[in-house]
Image: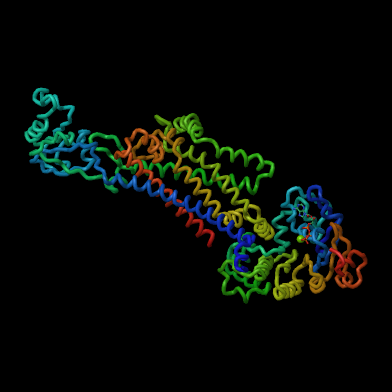
Amino acid sequence: MYKIESKNVNLHYGSFHALKGINMAIEKNTVTALIGPSGCGKSTFLRLFNRMNDLIDGVKIEGECLIDGKDIYSKSIKIDDLRKRVGMVFQKPNPFPKSVFENVAYGLRVNGITHKNFIEERVEVCLKQAALWDEVKDKLKKSAMALSGGQQQRLCIARALAIEPSVLLMDEPASALDPISTAKIEELIYDLKNLYTIIIVTHNMQQAGRVSDSTAFFYLGELVEFDSTKKIFTNPTDVRTQNYITGRFG
Amino acid sequence: MRLLLVLVKPLPLTVIKKILNKTIEGVLMLSSTITTLTVLLIVLFLFKEGVSVFKESPLDGDNVIVLNNQNDVNHLSAADIKKIFDQETTNWKLVGGANDSILLFTFNDLSNYFSEEELGPEFEYLPHKMDSLIEANPGMIAVFSKKYLDKNHKSKVATIDNISPKTFLLGKEWFPTANPAVQLGVLPLILGTLYVSIVAILIALPIGLATAIYIAEVAHPKIRAIYKPVIELLAGIPSVVYGFFGLIVIVPLIQKIFDLPVGESGLAGAIVLAIMALPTIITVTEDALRNTPRAMKEASLALGATQWQTIYKVVIPYSASGISAAAILGIGRAIGETMAVLMVTGNAAVMPHSLLEPLRTIPATIAAELGEAPANGIHYKALFGLGCILFIITMVINIWVETISKRRVNR
Ligand SMILES: Nc1ncnc2c1ncn2[C@@H]1O[C@H](COP(=O)(O)OP(=O)(O)OP(=O)(O)O)[C@@H](O)[C@H]1O
Ligand SMILES: [Mg+2]
């Protein structure tokens, strides 16, 4: 069984057809990169899986989105339970204006966990996983807003890991970061693969090549090609994919 | 020759731009300075007039209080004088004198003691007669104009305290036109103001917050599109209209529910004020809530927080300063509101014991009495003093709310 599946998904923002009949199936514990020119629907597709699009007025979604074989848009699914299983890291770092510690603890607290030692342990583990522990261990009580952009983004990753989701959605997590922070996050993604199924949106072809097992190329709301990363980058089937990865348009 | 040419050259564009910028800068600075100065001047003027009440004697006009020379009492307070002339105090020992009953004399009693012939056609014999009369009656206290005081009087003039900050602030009686000594205790008015405003804000803040949350976060956009303009419209209704509403709906309702002789009461004032403060509180709070960045809310929801958890843990803390601004504006409106309160609180300047009794607020007092207080008289100055107190109360509350919300944000 696939971990994540989308079956003939169509999404409309009002009258705008943003996703056109997307079919995709993703294996457990793999990293999938979504690439494509700006506005082609990568973020929209990513946000399907934690139902973030539901927040937008006038969105219409057809087709089936499955996680572990269950339709996440069925009436029997509670959205906040789903979101606990499907973590998300946003394009821009968006820590809460709270302390570093409280940022990571947030997901635990809203889950009703109050056990102090458990929370402390979890915060430390997640900050270590996100390769941030050494930099912030002395300022856990300080405001997260005082961290650098790269540190904030790793904090947001730690925050997403705290509730132990099984799927991690990352929307251009390194787009605002310097090469060192980017390298740290890529390493992190590589490490996390054993525990999570990861979908990552990126504009950086090298990055997609480095971190992902399979790659999906989107164009104008369509899924043009979806295959192993190696195949996409060496021998794409579609000419549009070829043009995009060689930088001829987009 | 070359030098001259340089001088004649037209001003370059950058110089013109620079001058223009400087002018705009100057105009902006000037207008902000003028605004600030005006505010300062108003405050200064208010306090100058208000503080001058403390140089005044509570005695009406140029009257004097005259006692028998043998009387142990030399000194009386305004409150003593009022009690004596109201015949509540009838024995000198109650004001620190000997055990002797008090004999009142005012000019109304003049004909009981003297005939017109005795006083002379121009009252020229009156000073002497008065002096002898008082000297003949050891327990007598007389009040009359200074000009009828005999040049070499044997009777003695009692000294009277000027209005002191203590009697002004802590005095419990407000009779600014009492005769012969005015009573300027503003405590009932301060308490009336505080009671009504605090209760009003206690009613308005939770309701306002709840409504704002509903409109900003929960309501369907179509419902919001109806609610928001209606609430904003409410803010523009003149306060007299709220006063009428209070008088016709709330006052009778309170009278019926609590089975009171009159429905005009502190509670009626508080409810009307709460209704009046609501639109401001709702609009300002709602704007603050909606200013929470979408990214913050999405971050919270993406971690599996429910909508309510997100509102409680992210949206409200994020808008704390906006919410406290709403509270300040609401309190400001409540404390400063005059007309509506005047109409529904029953206007009794007495110490408020419960919210179900009539009471009176500072602004209502100023509005009701300023017209009949002679300019620069003691009553007039006392009303300015009330204005100062109102100003101080509002400022203290503003600073207080500000520090609370700062602490919250820093946490
Ligand atoms: N809230 C919205 N309302 C209406 N249209 C939207 C909304 N969000 C996105 N769209 C439209 O849907 C299309 C896909 O948007 P999406 O954000 O998924 O693109 P993307 O591939 O992530 O682009 P980028 O690489 O720039 O992030 C775009 O044309 C965009 O204009
Ligand atoms: Mg995007």
Find residue A223 and report its horizontal and vertical position in percent: 86, 60
Circle count? 0
Find residue A92 and report its horizontal and vertical position in percent: 69, 63
Q: Nearer the viewer, residue A97 or B41?
A: B41
Q: Is residue A224 left or right of residue A107?
A: right
In this rendering, the answer to whether B383 lies above or below B7 is above
| Residue located at (24% from left, 36% from top) | B60
Find residue B112 and report its horizontal and vertical position in percent: 13, 25
Find residue B2 and report its horizontal and vertical position in percent: 62, 68
Q: Is residue B411 left or right of residue A211?
A: left
Q: Is residue B152 left or right of residue A11?
A: left
Q: Quadrant of ligand 1?
A: bottom right
User: What residue occupies the far front of the structure in this picture?
Assistant: B1
Residue A100 appears in the picture as rendered: no
| Quarter of the rendering containing residue A151 | bottom right
Q: Nearer the viewer, residue B19 or B154?
A: B19
| Quarter of the rendering containing residue B280 | top right
Q: Nearer the viewer, residue A148 or B377?
A: B377
Q: How is the image coloured?
A: rainbow
Question: Which of the image's four quarters has the N terminus of chain B?
Answer: bottom right
Residue B116 appears in the picture as rendered: yes
In this rendering, the answer to whether B122 lies above or below B201 is above
| Quarter of the rendering containing residue B135 | top left
| Residue located at (41% from left, 49% from top) | B41
